[in-house]
């Protein structure tokens, strides 16, 4: 279950940030200062104004492990969908074992598809289909990290968490990848984290047990919002008894055309058949 903390997702390492002291003031973003932090986050979370699609880059760091990077896109509609490609080579090199070069994954509705490119196995070319029930139960595998990955691929999850923060604060203007933004931060209780990551009673029980064992009491959530109330970056930091787990996500290309479709059925196998 430690993977549930460590493979959360993130904005890639090349992304840049300009602090409030270095930023050129922007009238649109500075106008957010007239609103309370809670009002800004509530506006960012309004579904009728939230972008229907975006591209993202991700970076996850955890104690004693190489950073995990990924890129992808999401779309909302009658059926929400997300696709991403995760670089796995560093993890394999660190472990000293053969490892697929990358993992490709899609989440369409309540079903996930993934394949391990470069693994030299049938999973290299075939897609494995995993239902929401399989992800919750594990199906014999530790799939908790997949649930975490999916939940963090949409900035709405971070907005919902910040709205539950006990100390939500406005940290001022900052520039993210050339875009003026307003920076907000709050502390999230462990109970809120568990609700956001686990969708059923058994998953919540296992996650509570993991948090107790690793002494995770909550997380610090940062979000950067532009003048159109788009989330430009989200950073989630969780401190444990083995160190800090950090997930950074950077978003761009809002409402650009994104098409995410399920793989050809002829190239798909169910999780139970793949094991």
Image (tube, grey):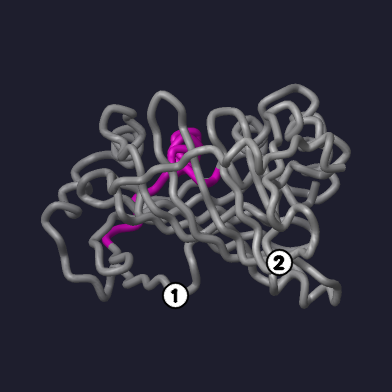
Q: How many C-alpha atoms fall within 10 Å of the one at disc 1: few (<14), some, or many (≥20)?
A: few
User: Magenta stretch: residue 109 in it?
Assistant: no
- Which residue position holds label 1? 14
Residue at 78% from the left image edge and 76% from the top image edge: 94
Q: Position of residue 257 (x, y in %)?
A: 30, 46
| Magenta residues (range) | 152-173
Closest to the observer, 37 or 8:
8
Does the rendering let one see residue 145? yes
Residue at 65% from the left image edge and 58% from the top image edge: 103
Disc nearer the start of the sequence (1/2): 1
Compared across the picture, whether 174 is left or right of 83 comes to left
Please identify the quarter of the rendering in which residue 242 is found: bottom right
Please identify the quarter of the rendering in which residue 20 is found: bottom left
- Which residue position holds label 2? 118
Residue at 11% from the left image edge and 56% from the top image edge: 27
Give the number of the disc on residue 46: none
Mark 1 or mark 2, whichever is nearer to me: 2
Residue 1 to residue 208: above or below = below
Q: Are marks 1 and 2 in contact (CB under 8 Å)?
A: no
Please identify the quarter of the rendering in which residue 144 is found: top right
Q: Secondary structure at mark 1?
A: loop
Which residue is situated farthest in the front direction here?
266
Q: Position of residue 81 (x, y in %)?
A: 48, 37
Closest to the observer, 173 or 112:
112
Residue at 22% from the left image edge and 48% from the top image edge: 33
Q: What is the quadrant of the C terminus in the image?
A: top right
Residue 109 to residue 114: above or below = above
Does the rendering let one see residue 165? no
Q: CA distance from mark 1 to mark 2?
A: 25 Å
Q: Position of residue 53 (x, y in %)?
A: 35, 43
């Amino acid at each position: 279950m430690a993977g549930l903390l460590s493979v959360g997702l993130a904005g890639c390492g090349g992304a840049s940030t300009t602090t409030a002291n270095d930023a050129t003031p922007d009238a649109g973003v500075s106008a957010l200062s007239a609103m309370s932090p809670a009002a800004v986050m509530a506006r960012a979370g309004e579904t009728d104004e939230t972008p229907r699609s975006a591209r993202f880059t991700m970076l996850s760091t955890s104690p004693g492990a190489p950073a995990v990077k990924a890129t992808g896109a999401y779309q909302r509609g009658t059926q929400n969908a997300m696709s991403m490609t995760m670089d796995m080579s560093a993890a394999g090199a660190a472990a000293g074992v053969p490892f697929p070069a990358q993992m490709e994954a899609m989440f369409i509705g309540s079903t996930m598809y993934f394949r391990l490119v470069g693994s030299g196995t049938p999973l290299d070319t075939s897609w494995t289909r995993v239902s929401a029930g399989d992800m919750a139960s594990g199906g014999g595998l530790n799939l908790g990290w997949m649930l975490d990955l999916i939940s963090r691929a949409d900035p709405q999850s971070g907005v919902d968490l910040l709205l539950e923060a006990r100390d939500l604060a406005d940290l001022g203007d900052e520039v993210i990848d050339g875009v003026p933004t307003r920076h907000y931060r709050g502390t999230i209780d462990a109970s809120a984290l568990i609700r956001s990551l686990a969708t059923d009673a058994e998953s919540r029980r296992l996650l509570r047990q993991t948090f107790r064992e690793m002494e995770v009491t909550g997380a610090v959530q940062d979000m950067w919002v532009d003048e159109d109330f788009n989330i430009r970056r989200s950073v989630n930091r969780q401190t444990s008894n083995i160190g800090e787990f950090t997930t950074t996500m950077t978003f761009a290309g809002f409402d650009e055309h994104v098409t995410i479709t399920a793989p050809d059925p002829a190239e798909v196998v169910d999780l139970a058949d793949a094991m």
